Image (spheres, rainbow, N blue to C red):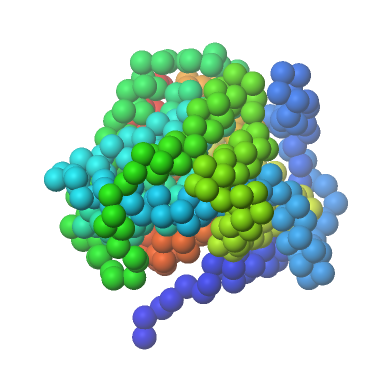
Amino acid sequence: MRFRLPHPLVLLLGAVGIAAALTWILPAGEYERRTDAASGREVVVAGTYHRVDQTPVGVAAAVMAVPRGIIEGADIIVVVLLVGGAFALLDATGALGRLVGSLVGRTKRPRTVVIVISIAFATLGALENMHEEIIALVPVLLVLSRGLGFGAITSLAMSLGAAVVGSAFGPTNPFQTGIALRFAELPAMSMPALRFGLFGAAVAVWIAWTLFMTSRDDVRPDVTAPASEPATKRDVLLLTLLIVPFIPYVIGVMRYDWGFNELSALFLVAGFAVGLVSGRNLSATAAEFLKGMEVMLAASLFIGVARAISVVFTDGHIIDTIVHGLATPLAHLPGMVAAMMMVPMHAVLHIPVTSVSGHAVLTMPIMAPLSDLLGVSRDAAVIAYQTGAGLMDALTPTSGALLAMLLAARVSYGRWMRFAVPGMLLVAVVGMIGIALAS
């Protein structure tokens, strides 16, 4: 009998239970922290780990962690609902189907479309760490992939996979590279030639893997075919109304420290604009907007439940214990070996710490001084973080966003792992080469 993983919600709730159990097993401990004046973030002070009183999380507290996690993830949940509602509203107008149908009907090189879309998502990942926003786009990409003759895996590879690779190696990504460089006390564009080279090589490797596997991506007749009617100028205008918000958002992220709340506000306006331009009145637009949000409810809930895992670890005071336990053995290894071993260390740590920015704030103040002791550059330590933590965004089973995308594409976690793990390992080789060059 073939083993099947449980429903994503059950998987996440089980992870919350495991996290609670670990608070009874692992010793509680903490690093001292200081406030970074520029960012206002609390950062750890290397070499200050110490034991604290055990605070195990019981059954009642673990259950309470779920609504607390939903509250902590409210900004991401709202953006998923509003972006998803806006695209569902666009789909209800019939514009998406006609646009996708026109694209599929005109292209004679489907692999070229895969390359172009992959580069676009990789670029968005490099610019603004695009991840949760993809959830709302999965149904559209799924129809496009089917129309091109490929399957659900290809739709995820050219969106989720490409965005993760782009985010991990994007030299200007403020949520990964930018934060890691800052807390490693390096300039914002440290070793630019190497970083841009790694970005190009990593994206090229992922696209090559995607194209290599397209022939094995089963096309299943469970998705409606693209509309056969020709697209109209109004269809193009409606799609433009939902693409335009990404432009000020990317600029805002890079210059004005914008976050998910600003993106939510932009799509609230864009959603109503789509409804009104399509000929609906305000009441009909609001009703259709809310109907579209209903489709994204499960995806939003996954994100909140995933946050509950970190809530439990924090309540139990074992996050720092895990970091200390993973980092300490590296000090006894030869410099280059230790630098390479930072990659799997970050990968393992990213399972309980699913936020890449939070991961950087937690680990880089420790790993940067450790790299000095090991005789390797701090740039190598940052690239190790990018490779280990960044690429795990496409793999970690505690990521609510990842599970939501898989659910939307009707792809099981196991099926995605069989495709994504070999590809991400190939991309990780690029990161390993970068570590060697930066050392």
Depth order, front residue of 132/333: 132
Question: Seen from this angle, which residue lies furthest left?
Answer: 108
Pick the residue in front: 8 or 56: 8
**Figure quadrant of residue 301:** bottom right
375 vs 279: above or below: above
Quadrant of the snapshot with the N terminus = bottom left
**Residue 67 % position (x, y):** 76, 60
Q: Is residue 91 left or right of residue 157?
A: right
Can residue 18 be seen here? no
Q: Nearer the viewer, residue 398 or 151?
A: 151
Q: Quadrant of residue 185?
A: top right
User: Could you say where residue 133 lies in the image, as x and y percent from the top left?
Assistant: 52, 45
- Please state if 24 lies on the left or on the right of 425 as rendered: right
Residue farthest to the right, as pictured: 53
Image coordinates for residue 398, horizontal then vertical, percent:
56, 57
Which residue is drawn at the image coordinates 28% and 69% (left, top)? 220
Would residue 147 appear left or right of 437 to someone viewing this image?
Answer: left
Residue at the spot 58% in from the left edge and 57% down from the top edge:
288
| Depth order, front residue of 139/158 | 139
